[in-house]
Amino acid sequence: MRSGRMTVIKICRSLFHTSGVLGQSKNLKIKSAKEVVKLMNSSDKPNIRENKDDRDKPTWQKQVLALKRKFKGEKWNPSKKVSREEMESMRLLKNQFPQITARELSARYKVSPEAIRRVLKSKWQPSERESIRLHERWKRRGVRIKEMYEQSSEQSPLFQNLPLPKRISISSARSSPDFVLRNIKPRDATKKLPKTDKAAAPRNKGKLFLLKDSLRQNK
């Protein structure tokens, strides 16, 4: 037992001499293998302290630090999921315009050129049963969205109780720069305004007619 312990100490001493670690601890006298293990584990203390500091931090701060370590300081840029319709449109564009490149398609669809190449390389086509199932799913989704819209409109009617706009009549004398408010009439939304026939209206441009018109407006 003692001979085995001595061999372990000799091996550790040789490792320390070759690695240069013993130069930092020349005055230390190694007596047992436990001290050697303690000395070797002393270099891992900074990592242990960092782990203890992370434990004391709140959860949100741990998540932020984990994301920084994962992305190495870069911004989080998640990959965009391409729909089936977009995949079909990519293939259609490539068939109609063979000279178009993957980089141009990636700029159009906001995905990487590698994703464009994978989509164009794939030959998968949905079966008839799969197409029917997708059509039914989109149909159910449309019905569900319509129901949600009807419920939201019933709960918060924005345009149901709005007052009807009013018609304001303003007149002024031809020689006066001031405007006079005559009356305010509520406008009926169901009643249409009569159309005036400009051709049938008499065009009286005499001074007497203009005077009567201005007096009638000032009343």
Image (cartoon, helix red, strand yellow):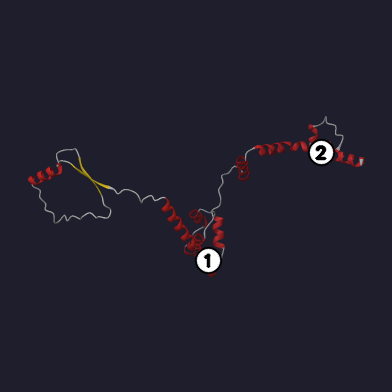
Q: Is residue 153 above or below residue 184?
A: below
Q: Is residue 128 above or below residue 39?
A: below
Q: Quadrant of residue 36?
A: top right
In percent of width and height, residue 135 lies at 49, 65
In percent of width and height, residue 21 lies at 79, 35
Q: Disc 2 marks which amino acid?
A: Val
Q: Is residue 36 visible?
A: yes
Q: Is residue 45 left or right of residue 140?
A: right
In percent of width and height, residue 134 lies at 52, 64
Q: What is the distance, in whole Å, between disc 1 and disc 2 at their CAs?
A: 65 Å
Q: Which residue is mark 1?
A: 133
Q: Residue at x 49, y 62 (%)?
A: 140
Give whichever of 3, 183 is nearer the camera.
Answer: 183
In percent of width and height, residue 22 lies at 81, 34
Q: Disc 1 marks which amino acid?
A: Arg
Q: Residue at x 85, y 38 (%)?
A: 33
Q: Is residue 157 above or below residue 46?
A: below
Q: Residue at x 29, y 48 (%)?
A: 165
* Between discs 1 and 2, the one toward the N terminus: 2
Q: Quadrant of the N terminus?
A: top right
Q: Quadrant of the C terminus?
A: top left
What is the crowding at mark 1: few (fewer than 14 residues within 10 Å), some, or many (at least 20)? few
Secondary structure found at label 1: helix
Q: Which residue is mark 2?
A: 37
Q: Which mark is residue 66?
A: none
What is the crowding at mark 2: few (fewer than 14 residues within 10 Å), some, or many (at least 20)? few
Residue farthest along the bottom direction in this orientation:
128
Badge nearest the viewer, 1 or 2: 1
